[in-house]
Every structure is written in C-alpha cells, then in structure tokens.
Image (cartoon, rainbow, N blue to C red):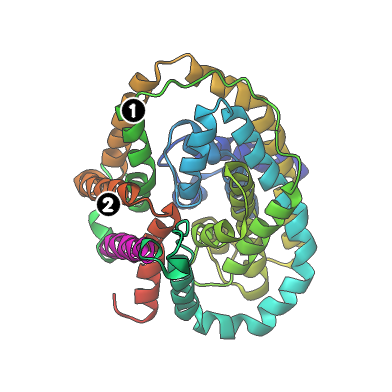
Amino acid sequence: MDLLLLIIAILFGFLLGVVSGLTPGIHVNNLALLLLGIAPLAPLPLPYIAVLILSNYIAHTFFDIVPSVFIGAPDEETALAVLPGHRLLLEGRGIEAIKLSATGSALSVPISLTMMPVLSILFIHLYATVESMTPHILIAILIFMVFMEREEEIPGQGSFSFSRQRRRLFAILSISLSGLLGTFAFRYQDIFTPLIPIPSSFLFPLLTGLFGAPIIAQSIRNKPQIPEQDKREIAMKKNIFKNSFIGSLSGSLVSWLPGVSSGVATVLARYFVRGESEEFIISLSSVNTSNALYNLLFFYLLGISRSGAINGVKSLLGFISLDWFLIFLAVAVLISLFSYISLLHLSPSLSLIFTRLNYTTLNISILIFLFGMILLFTGINGILLFLLSFFVGSALQKLGVKRTNAMSCIMIPIILMRFNII
C-alpha cells in the first residue's frame, strides 16, 4: 500500500464531499457514478479511487445538513431536517444547528463501531429472513406513522375524538398523495434526463418540491427577518448521546432492507426522539453517518451494495478483504474527524454570509437557483415533477400533518416494486 497515494485519495475525497454536501442537487451517489466513469482515466490505482469515493461519501453525510438549514434545499437524507433547521435559523441558532448536526454525525461513528460485532453476527444469520420481509416491514412503518399522528385531546371527547380521527385521515391522505407522486417518479424515472451529461436523480426535484420549496415559499409570503446568528454554542446539554444512539441504531437497522435508504431510518428515529428541533437534528445526522458505515459493513460481509457510493466501490474492487475493510473503517473515522472540525470552524462564516443578505431576496434567489439546478440536472420533466411535488408539499403544509408522512414518496414505490406491481 502506497501511503502517499492513500493520503491524496483521502484528501481529494474529503474536498469532494464538502463540495457535494454544500451544493444542492449534487448527491453523493451521482458523484460516485461520475467518479466510476472517469476511473480508467484517473492516475490512481483502483483501490485508492475506492478510498476517494468512500471519503466523499462520509464527508457528504456531515456537510449535507448545511443546504437544509440555510437554503431549505434537501436531499433524501436531510429532507426531514428542513423544517427544524429553518426554525432554528429564524431563532438565530443556525450555527448551533450545524454544530448539533456535526456532533450527531461524529458521535455516531464510535456508537456504530461499538455495535458492529453484534450486528455483524445478526446480519449474517438473519439477512435472508429480513430481506424477504422488507415490504411488510415498510407497510408496518406506514401504519405506525398514521397512528402516531395525534392532536391534542378535546375535553369530553376522549382519545377517539373526531379531531384525532380527522388528523389520522389527513395522515392517510398525505401518505397516499406523496406515495402516488413517488410511484409515478420511480415508474418513469428514465424520462428525467439532464441537460448536461452527468449522472442525476429524480429525487432532487421530488424532495425539493415536497420539503424545501414550500418552506421557502412560506418565508417569501410571511417576510420573516433572519436574525443575527449570535447563538454559537450548543444550548442542549442533556440527551445528546441518547439521541445519537437512536439515530445510529435506526441507520444500522435500515441498512438491512433492500432499496431502503437512510431517509426511511430518519422516519423511524423521528418517532422515538422526544424533544424539539435540536434533538431531531442530532438523531437525523447520526442516521446518515451510521447508515454509511453499515452499508460498508454489509458490503464486506455479504458482498451486497446498499448505496450508489458503495456500489461504486464494489464495481471497482468486486469484494474487499478484511485488511481493506479495516483500512476503509480507519479512513471513515479520519474523514469524520476532519468533517467535524471543519464544520465547527466553517459554520460561523456560513451564517455570516446569510445574515448579511435580505432574506426575502435570498429566498427568491434560492427558488430561482433551485429551479435552474432542477432544469439542468433533470430537464423539463424534472421541472414538471418539481411543480407537482411543490403542490403536494404545500397541501400537506396546509393539512398540518407531520412532514415525515411525505417520505412515503420513497417507501410506497419500494413496497410496490418488491411486490412486482411497478
């Protein structure tokens, strides 16, 4: 092993992860496909390109929170962070939100590594059973989401008040609408062709319309003033480890399920985290980083890739030995440390840029920017999907149901595909 080449691959992968994490619309899986395509031309041997892809993957799980907090532009892993991140931003706590996210991701690394020996045994012995049950597990999660939709009890009407049942009917409606939209997008994903020759995903217009754009549009209507982001320290001192553990465990468990990403793990974690925006951001970030580590573990144990990034590693190497698996784990730990320290230092500068801009003008500019990125990455059909998603996302906002329901746009298509319906 060439130590110099290893260092070059780690640093270049880290820098790419910073860029992909901070830039709306550039997903780490798409970047992995691009790197895979240019691998034969690269001056690095294939194992070091695999290190580069993994470094990009881990760094991305740290930095992708920034567009969700400051811009309202999510990807699949951070879609549910848009609303709590926006709330903290309007409270002058944008820097704190980034630090909370960095802390959650950083804590998930030792937590995930500690759980790996036990979960490795479970992976090997129970994978076939869990794999066959995937659609049934997702259906159970959807039912759970409906029954967790609650409204305050009306005096004299008990727990089965019309108010509560109406809220659950709204949840069913929101899950159905989002699932129908997602099913259409999955079924016809080949029609979303980019205007430039780079790998792209229909999830960008889908999730931006469902989660990000409605929040931005509401801000334009209400004209809030973004306050100075003067709260730089993490106010929450308790339960940080607990929330990170919940996120890490959710991220590890979902890595078992074929076709299911960390976005679904976030849905699970959301219902087991008791608290406000701070707790959820910690848990969500832990989900993403933990899921990345367990995708790597799953590949080593069973030779199965669970993400575009790990699929890139698989395409390059075919399989990995124990030595390379341990090297990859060491790289993941090192990149996590780099990313954590970098986010702590960059967050004040990022917030300073946003607080000096007119917030209404900024939001309009962001919508125009997102519109242009969607057109560039997914073409005219991507714009149409974005507009449909925006309509559905705005309707869900009016209904007042939990935003987690909109993640059915991914869960329902997976269920239908597993039953060979689409």
Q: In the rendered image, which residue does mark 1 sit on?
A: 222
Q: Is residue 327 left or right of residue 142?
A: right
Residue 230 is covered by the magenta coloring: no
Q: Which residues are magenta?
A: 165-186
Q: Which amino acid is tagged 1? A: Asn
The foreground one among 147 and 252 is: 147
Predominant SS of the magenta segment: helix
Instruction: Locate residue 127, reporting x and y percent.
Output: 61, 80
Which residue is painted at 73% across and 52% down in the image?
109
Instruction: Locate residue 376, reporting x and y percent.
Output: 29, 39
Instruction: Locate residue 87, reporting x and y percent.
Output: 50, 35
Q: In the rendered image, which residue does mark 2 sit on?
A: 392
Secondary structure under tag 1 reads: helix
Residue 185 is covered by the magenta coloring: yes
Q: Is residue 257 left or right of residue 47?
A: left
Q: How many other residues sit within 10 Å of disc 2, few (<14), some (14-19) or many (≥20)?
A: many
Which residue is painted at 67% across and 68% down in the image?
300
Image quadrant containing the C terminus: bottom left
The answer, for residue 45, to whether it is visible in the render is no
Q: Which amino acid is tagged 2? A: Val
Is residue 162 placed above or below 78 in the rendered structure? below
The foreground one among 361 and 63 is: 361
Q: Is residue 300 left or right of residue 353?
A: right
User: Of the residues tagged 1 and 2, which is closer to the observer?
Assistant: 1
